[in-house]
Amino acid sequence: MSDILLVFVSVSILVWIYVSVWYVVALVKKRNDLADVAWGMGFALVSLFLLFQRPDSQILWLLSMLVLAWGVRLSGHIYLRGRGKPEDFRYKKWREEWGGNFLWRSYLQVFVLQGFFLIVIVSPIVWASTQPSPSWSIWTLLGILGWIKGFLFQVIGDAQLARFVKTKKPGEILQTGLWKYSRHPNYFGEIVMWWSVFLITLPVEGSLYFIISPLTITFLLTFVSGVPMLEVKYKDNFAFQAYKKRTSALIPWFPSKSTEAGK
């Protein structure tokens, strides 16, 4: 077995063990939304695992620190947001729909599937860990600047939403701050961060093939588990539907109308 294949197999086994442990914890806690808490820390775990294999690589150090900062912050934020509250409505709905098939479907369709996407998205870093470490370049600088921008969008967007939720009235929609220009600035930030990680790996020979990573996270957040699953909750909310018509889904842009509805 080649060294490259061995690294990918090792990462896959590590991720499988990781998601399986979280599945057991979710069964005990009766909360499948713990998968969201596990998401960011899973990336951090893989990045640290790779760094220990190649502690001499400056690019790998940079990538690992960026992913560690993003993953730990995101997992901590999601944990604190859900602490003391019922299971997230999306997972609760699946629990009800799956009935007697809940055990195996939640394992495969929530935890194992999430592990698969984790491996796909982190693949540029896995590949970079198997190749000679390149010198820093313009791609490194662009990637760092892009990552900082994405990180700020996610952190500020999450903070603005957290403050709003504490005082919001029933049916009220956040339409100020970053949320005036994007319905999901936190998702936009996450997408930008992973495109930036990909940019940093571009000088690594063969890395272009792993554009599948940022394409995957963009597709998931735009069409699958991000925007659509959250917005279906507001399909009967008149204020949100009006907000939706004038506000960009992800990429921040000026509202299509000059008038503001406030929060």
Image: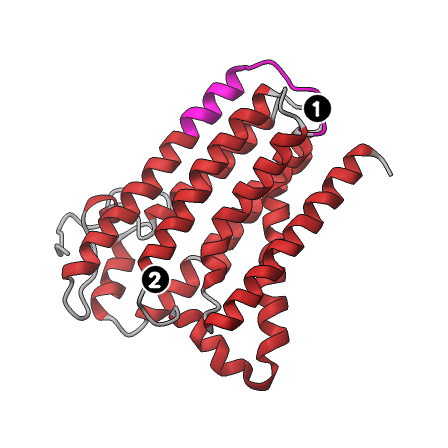
- Which quadrant does the C terminus fall into? bottom left
Q: Residue at x 39, y 68 (%)?
A: 88
Taking 138 as reference, is 98 above or below it? below
| Relative side of 247 to 224, left or right | left
Residue 47 within the segment the image draws in magenta: no
Taking 263 as reference, is 143 above or below it? above
Secondary structure of residue under mark 1: loop
Residue that badge 2 annotates: 82
Taking 146 as reference, is 223 above or below it? below
- Which quadrant does the N terminus fall into? top right
Secondary structure of residue under mark 2: helix
Residue that badge 1 annotates: 205
The kind of residue on which mark 2 rests is Gly
Residue 55: image quadrant is: top right
| Relative side of 19 to 150, left or right | right
The kind of residue on which mark 1 rests is Glu
Q: Are marks 2 and 1 in contact (CB under 8 Å)?
A: no
Disc 2 or 1, which lies upstream in sequence? 2
Residue 141 within the segment the image draws in magenta: yes
In front of the other: 133 or 80: 80
Q: Which residues are magenta?
A: 130-146
